[in-house]
Image (spheres, helix red, strand yellow):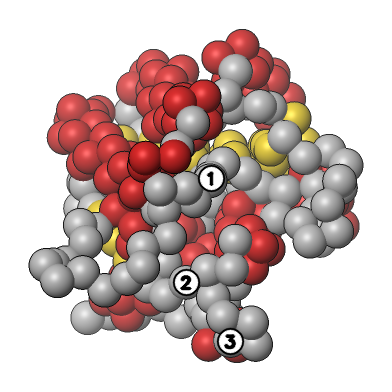
Amino acid sequence: MRAVSTKGALQGRVAIVTGASRGIGAAIARRFAAAGAAVAVSARTEAESDARLPGTIHETARAITAAGGRAVAVRADLASPEDRRRLVATAEAELGPVDVLVNNAAVTWFIPVVEFPMRRLEVMFEVQVKAPFELAQLVLPGMRERRRGWILNISSGAARHPQGPPYPGPYRGGTVYGMCKAAIERLSTGLAAEVYDAGIAVNALSPARVVATPGVVVHRLIPPGAEDRAEPVEVMAEAALALCSGDPGALTGRVAYSQPLLDELGIRVP
């Protein structure tokens, strides 16, 4: 197939990227800005409090503006419905109507179900399931009116069902995380069907391999010294750009994996 071009693919568009202080979210925000989008960079992190988790929304926004792009940093705790509404209102006031929404923010604890505190379960579902749901509700009316829009939910291979019995183990307490990601994938495919006739694309995107983000390293999801075998954040960013600039009539309703998607579309990471 003919390779898809993403050069200037988001020129004149406005995007919200959550969880964009570091890692995958920051890479997506920078890539979207390089493709022409004005980006609302959102996360809770305005100041570093843990040296193992470097990066803030202001640093991401400064990197975008230093490269000639346009960005605004919006602090938001997505466990708060008030902050969710304020994020969208601020992005629209500062940058204009939202064309692209990337739900990347996450808060995660790896604890076995029998020990999992209900309060932490509630926080994980607020940030990883209810926040993407409500943010979509907030941006969809404008997208419907303009008859264009792209919503992308960042997922994980953890959404897949464990294969067994027997089960390789021991499991590290990732059941709740997998529940959240499975929910966001079903939201993506169901919402894609609901808004297809309005010219709006909705997809979920997972890395093909674990990505060596600061959070992944802190949670020890890859062995020390194995970071070079992980997927670069740039691969996820390029796949996100493809899904958020493609034809909503064709590239929607996907639960896509980064590198296989890029291979399918003939896109090479710069």
Give the mark toward the camera: 2 or 1: 1
Say which element carries label 3: loop
Above or below, 93 relative to 266: above
**Left or right: 27 as drawn, with respect to 231:** right
Which residue type does callout 3 highlight?
A: Ala
Which residue has dot 3 on it?
226
Q: In this view, does 249 lie above or below 228?
A: above
Furthest toward the front, the residue is: 114
Where, by quadrant of the figure, is residue 67 drawn? bottom right
Residue at 49% across / 31% down in the picture?
117
Report the amino acid beneath label 2.
Val
Crowding near the residue tagged with mark 2, few <14, some 14–19, many ≥20 C-alpha atoms within 10 Å: some
In this picture, residue 163 sits left or right of residue 140: left
Quadrant location of the C terminus? bottom right
Mark found first going from the N terminus, 2 or 1: 1
Nearer-the-camera pick, 214 or 237: 214
Residue 84 position within the rendered picture, expressed as x and y whole percent measured from the top left? 58, 20
Q: Mark 2 points at which residue?
A: 210
Q: Residue furthest top?
A: 82
> Within the image, what quadrant is residue 96 found in?
top right
Q: Which residue is drawn at 34% across and 49% down?
A: 175
The residue where tag 1 is placed is: 108
Percent of width and height locating residue 185: 28, 45
Q: Which residue is drawn at 72% across and 48% down?
A: 21
Quarter of image, res 45: top right
* Residue 2 at x, y percent in the picture: 28, 79
Q: How far apart are marks 2 and 1 (CA)?
A: 15 Å
Which residue type carries mark 1? Thr
